[in-house]
Image (tube, rainbow, N blue to C red):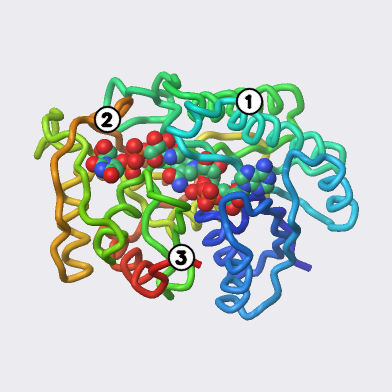
Amino acid sequence: MAETILVTGATGYIGSHTCVCLLKAGWRVVAVDNLSNSSMRTVDRIQTLCRQKLPFHLIDVRDESALMRLLSQENISAAIHFAGLKSVSESISKPLDYYDNNVNGSITLLKVLHQHGVRKFVFSSSATVYGEPKHVPISENASLSATNPYGRSKLFIEQIVNDLSEADAEWRIATLRYFNPAGAHESGLLGEDPRGQPNNLMPYIAQVAVGKLPHLSVFGNDYPTSDGTGVRDYIHVMDLAQGHLSALSRLYSRSGSFTVNLGTGQGVTVLQAVAAFEKACGASIPITVAPRRAGDIASCYASANKAEELLNWKAEKTLLQMVNDHWRWQKQNPNGY
Ligand code: NAD
Ligand code: WQD
């Protein structure tokens, strides 16, 4: 009998792709989401892709009694916790929402798991916890800081799960620091579906390519980088999803907790990302150069060595595959789900 994994935030961008990888690899999945930033249609798409039923529960992770009921019904042995709010700008205007959803949501979930004897936990952290990095590539032992409430919520949760594994060696916790997820499932059935105008580069370029937005504003071309634009580590969402399976396998095979970067180790500038997308969609993406965005850093990319050593995982897909898949999703679903 396959182990059952609780996936919170399962209908979101990264959660939905991870559900597909889990189901295809033979795990049983119980999906939870409050649909605050996703659609039920995702469940249908996952079921279509995997040709099996995905049990879905409309639950807010802050709802302790709903989680208690669910855990009493299902024989869960590990949880992957994606559920949370993720917009840096929104976190500055609504800090309490971010601390409540992200920090309280995680605490509530951890308490319920603890009460049901579940001690394996995978947490979605972010490269944002490195603040303004002193060196690139960034390794896991770099200093940590946060410049906004979203980043601080991730740092707090990292500290909470560290304290938990210190207090009780039975806990096996994987803290995964994602760099910049991009791309979509190769079928074009799953992808990122931002509500309103996108904040992030790839979905923004995709909406320009499909004609929903007139042009991309490039936030600054005077950074100390190869072409003056910001450098990031874009990682294909399917590679990222596979990273969760590798982390999960390690939790089942060995005791102890760990923190790893999930990135490619390669830095890509904004202009390189635009050029790659132009290749994918066969059209030019109009750009205008705008001032730097407040809070942005020049360069951020991962040292991917620890993930390879510890998890035997590394990102396989190229930037071109990423933008091709992103474009297929955007073209097939111009208005999202
Ligand atoms: P997403 O918004 O697409 O998915 C998050 C899901 O969680 C959504 O479906 C939303 O409805 C759900 N959710 C939010 N609050 C909830 C709550 N209280 N109870 C139940 N469900 C709730 O975001 P994503 O890009 O898939 O990100 C997943 C996780 O990865 C988040 O924790 C995010 O902070 C983290 N992360 C994302 C990125 C990124 O750039 N996408 C980078 C680093 C880390
Ligand atoms: C990438 C590059 C921009 C939009 C954010 C969060 C981070 C993480 C991922 C969750 C930068 C430039 C962007 C645009 C642009 N999320 N850009 N025009 O800033 O690395 O990270 O998302 O954890 O916490 O801060 O990603 O995609 O917003 O920007 O020129 O319209 O593209 O300046 O150089 P970022 P991004």
- The residue under label 3 is 336
Kind of residue indicated by mark 1: Asn
Find residue 162 and name its label: 1
For the residues labelled 1 and 3, the Cα–Cα distance comes to 37 Å
Q: Tell me, yes or no, whether the two marked residues, 1 and 3, touch with CB atoms within 8 Å.
A: no
Image x and y of residue 197, in percent: 38, 49
Residue at numbered disc 2: 136
Quarter assignment of residue 18: bottom right
Mark closer to the chain start, 2 or 1: 2
* Dot 1: element: helix
Q: Is residue 290 above or below residue 163?
A: below
Q: Is mark 3 on a helix, strand or loop?
A: loop
Few, some or many C-alpha atoms within 10 Å of disc 2 (few <14, some 14-19, many ≥20)?
some
Query: Where's the N terminus, which quadrant?
Result: bottom right
Image quarter for residue 185?
A: bottom left
Q: Relative to 46, is 193 on the left or the right?
A: left
Q: Which residue is drawn at the image coordinates 38% and 24% (left, top)?
A: 131
In this rendering, which labeled residue sits more in front, label 3 or label 2? 3
The reply, left or right, for residue 72 in relation to residue 243 is right
